[in-house]
Amino acid sequence: MDAPDTDVEGYLTDPADWSEDWAIEKAREIGIELTDDHWVALRFMRAFQEEHQVAPDARFVMRHLTETLGAGRNRLFELFPYGYVGQACKIAGMRRPRAWSTG
């Protein structure tokens, strides 16, 4: 199977091409070993994208982590220390957002 197409920054050009194996590989490329907490965030992001046809704003992911893990507001940034857009959205297979609120 060929690797999915990405743009010059490494974001998937078609979010439907995402797979968990692709996410693991992309995370490794940017220096992240995915833990259970990462997967809670990533699977929520994928479900939100599927339902709303748009990547979730960081505040929705923070709320989900708080509700499911009892995590603090900063947990998202602990999991993805170099940024929600640059790491979480990329690993979750989202297209590169044009503008973003980080919550």
Image: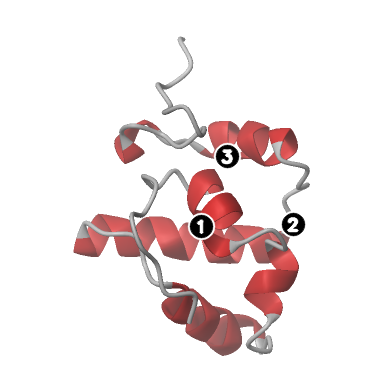
Residue 30: percent from the left, percent from the top? 71, 40
Disc number placed over residue 14 in the picture, else none: none
First along the sequence among labels 2 and 3:
3
- Say which element carries label 3: helix
Quote the CA–CA distance across marks 3 and 1: 14 Å
| Rendered residue at 48%/82% (across/down) | 103
List the residue tagged with mark 2. 35
Residue 88: percent from the left, percent from the top? 56, 56
First along the sequence among labels 3 and 1:
3
Quote the CA–CA distance across marks 2 and 1: 19 Å
List the residue tagged with mark 1. 85
Circle 3 Cα neighbour tier, 10 Å, few/some/many (<14 / 14–19 / ≥20): some
| Rendered residue at 55%/32% (across/down) | 22
- Say which element carries label 2: loop
List the residue tagged with mark 3. 23
Quote the CA–CA distance across marks 2 and 3: 12 Å
Circle 1 Cα neighbour tier, 10 Å, few/some/many (<14 / 14–19 / ≥20): many
Q: How many marks?
A: 3
The type of residue carrying mark 3 is Ala
The type of residue carrying mark 2 is Thr
Circle 2 Cα neighbour tier, 10 Å, few/some/many (<14 / 14–19 / ≥20): few
Q: Nearer the viewer's eye, disc 3 or disc 1? A: 1
Residue 48: percent from the left, percent from the top? 33, 64
